Image (cartoon, rainbow, N blue to C red):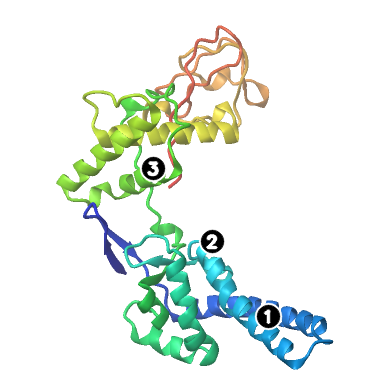
């Protein structure tokens, strides 16, 4: 693991890519690049067949620089460190501080790659990667970059903790359209790691993120509500909206008092809140009109009927998958 410290004094653990995965990604990239180079060379040879030898030599040098050197630099710059081989192997090039690379980083890596990969057939890059504690080649050392594993095993994935039950459904009217994706990512990363932070750093980060979120939504954070709980409740509300868009109104699945939807049970007519009995479920799993459902029952959840006058609140909680 590579320990990186951000400006908020938060230690990030990035797993450096080792030689086997980097070699596989490099082989994929070289196959694609050399195939493109051969096709371009054949096309130039046909196009410059009527010209003199100097023109053919200039075309060969230009194709070498553009395809074998310029193309990888452009791809890494535009994709922020993800070439085709790295994308296939779940790798990514990042800066030493964990941020995305820029053109100058890709340029240094590409220029050094001509010597340690193309001219030495990858021998220099392999030796440097084996010697380095973080598996870096010479181009990474000069560019200040690091190749890390972007895809981690599922069992290592950290889940956003659910909000307190008394906050579930409180932000149904909040406008979340103005919140940028990078802020959502920062909030999710904080919520998954907040139990690992120092209490002072935890409090300051929660306050800052809550302030940024309130500024984007245009509504102030509620008073006497902890900033971390406020962030978790808003993230929960966004997940609930995404679930309703993907699976319909019945996808509001939550924890605590929200319960869960009974598989195979359809609700018909205006249904009040109460308790459903086993004998009330009709043929085909349908609940007849007037039968009550109990939100305290862990087997059922409140469902909002589309008919006017139903009067039952929508299910707003959504527990993220473990």
Could you say which disc has been placed on residue 78 in the image? Answer: 2
SS type, badge 1: helix
Among all residues in the image, which is located at the extreme top? 309
* Secondary structure under the numbered disc 2 in the rendered image: helix
**Disc 2: CA contacts within 10 A as few (<14), some (14-19) or many (>=20):** some
Residue at x 70% of width, y 83% of height: 59
Which residue carries the number 3 mark?
183
Measuring from the top left, give residue 144's x and y in whole percent.
35, 72
Between tags 1 and 3, which lies in front? Answer: 1
The residue positioned 39% from the left and 42% from the top of the image is 183
Q: Which residue is mark 1?
A: 37
Closer to us: 143 or 304: 143
Question: What's the CA distance linking mark 2 and mark 3?
Answer: 22 Å
Query: How far, Cα to Cα, is label 1 from label 2?
Result: 20 Å
Q: Is residue 28 visible?
A: no
| Mark 1 closeness class: few <14, some 14–19, many ≥20 residues within 10 Å | some
- Vertical side of 279 occupied by 34: above or below: below
Q: How many marks?
A: 3
Quarter of the image holding residue 75? bottom right
- The correct choice, above or below, for 109 with respect to 184 in the image is below
């Amino acid at each position: 693991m590579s320990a990186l410290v951000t400006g908020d004094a938060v230690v990030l653990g990035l797993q450096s890519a080792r030689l086997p995965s980097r070699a596989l990604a490099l082989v994929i990239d070289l196959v694609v690049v050399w195939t493109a180079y051969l096709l371009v060379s054949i096309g130039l040879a046909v196009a410059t067949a009527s010209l003199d030898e100097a023109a053919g030599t200039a075309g060969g040098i230009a194709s070498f620089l553009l395809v074998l050197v310029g193309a990888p630099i452009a791809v890494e710059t535009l994709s922020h460190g993800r070439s085709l081989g790295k994308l296939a192997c779940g790798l990514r090039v990042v800066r030493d501080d964990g941020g995305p690379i820029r053109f100058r980083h890709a340029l240094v890596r590409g220029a050094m790659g001509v010597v340690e990969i193309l001219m030495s057939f990858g021998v220099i890059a392999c030796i440097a990667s084996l010697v380095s504690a973080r598996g870096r080649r010479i181009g990474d050392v000069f560019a200040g970059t690091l190749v890390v594993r972007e895809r981690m095993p599922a069992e290592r994935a950290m889940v956003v903790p659910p909000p307190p039950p008394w906050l579930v459904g409180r932000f149904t009217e909040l406008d979340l359209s103005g919140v940028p994706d990078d802020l959502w990512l920062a909030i999710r990363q904080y919520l998954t790691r907040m139990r690992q932070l120092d209490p002072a750093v935890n409090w300051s980060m929660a306050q800052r993120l809550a302030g940024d979120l309130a500024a984007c939504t245009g509504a102030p954070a509620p008073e006497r509500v902890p900033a971390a709980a406020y962030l978790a409740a808003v993230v929960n509300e966004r997940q609930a909206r995404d679930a309703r868009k993907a699976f319909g109104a019945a996808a509001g699945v939550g924890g605590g008092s929200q319960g869960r939807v009974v598989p195979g049970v359809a609700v018909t007519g205006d249904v009040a809140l109460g308790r459903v009995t086993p004998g009330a479920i009709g043929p085909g799993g349908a609940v007849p009109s007037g039968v009550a459902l109990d939100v305290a029952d862990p087997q059922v959840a409140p469902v909002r009927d589309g008919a006017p006058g139903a009067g039952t609140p929508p299910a707003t909680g959504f527990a993220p998958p473990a």
